[in-house]
Image (cartoon, rainbow, N blue to C red):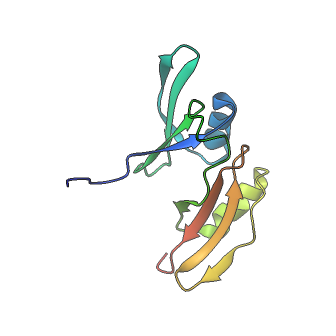
Amino acid sequence: MHISRIAIVSIPVSDQKAAQAFYQGKLGFKVVSDQPMGPGQRWIELAPTQQGTTITLVTWFEEMPPGSVQGLVLETEDIAADYEELRAKGIEVSSIEEAEWGKFATFSDPDGNGWVLVQSPDA
């Protein structure tokens, strides 16, 4: 096998434009692609500032209702600063917890998709 990476993760949302506003405005993701994909559908793909794996905001998978994705991990070099910035932007974030593998806090997007913000002990 020659699989080299996870390229795109589908995030099920109820409203693509509202979700795009959250991921761009609150998390600082950049639009990689925003184009028509068929009648009433758009391909909206976003990426964190460091690129890598991207996300796409999907509404067309019946098996993936909005809010059904949990445990996606975002890596940061300064969890305390990002935690404060998320709270200042009105995002409800759990308290920062420490584990042997690093520090983490959790939050959800407006549809309830769950994210984990992680800082490794090396950062």
Dividing the picture into quadrants, the one containing residue 39 is top right
Residue 115 horizontal/vertical position (percent):
62, 57
Q: Residue furthest left?
A: 1
Dividing the picture into quadrants, the one containing residue 98 is bottom right
- In the image, residue 42 sits, relative to residue 88, either above or below, namely above
- In the image, residue 11 sits, relative to residue 107, either above or below, namely above
Say whether residue 54 is left or right of residue 27: left
Residue 60 horizontal/vertical position (percent):
57, 29
Identify the residue shown where x is 66% and y is 50%. Answer: 113
Quadrant where the image shows the N terminus: bottom left
Say whether residue 56 is left or right of residue 52: right
- In the image, residue 66 sits, relative to residue 77, either above or below, namely above
Q: Residue furthest front?
A: 63
Residue in the foreground of this view, choosing between 17 and 13:
13
Dividing the picture into quadrants, the one containing residue 59 is top right
Residue 100 horizontal/vertical position (percent):
55, 86
Tell how many labels. Answer: 0
- In the image, residue 102 sits, relative to residue 83, either above or below, namely below
Identify the residue shown where x is 76% and y is 58%. Answer: 87
Q: Residue furthest top?
A: 39
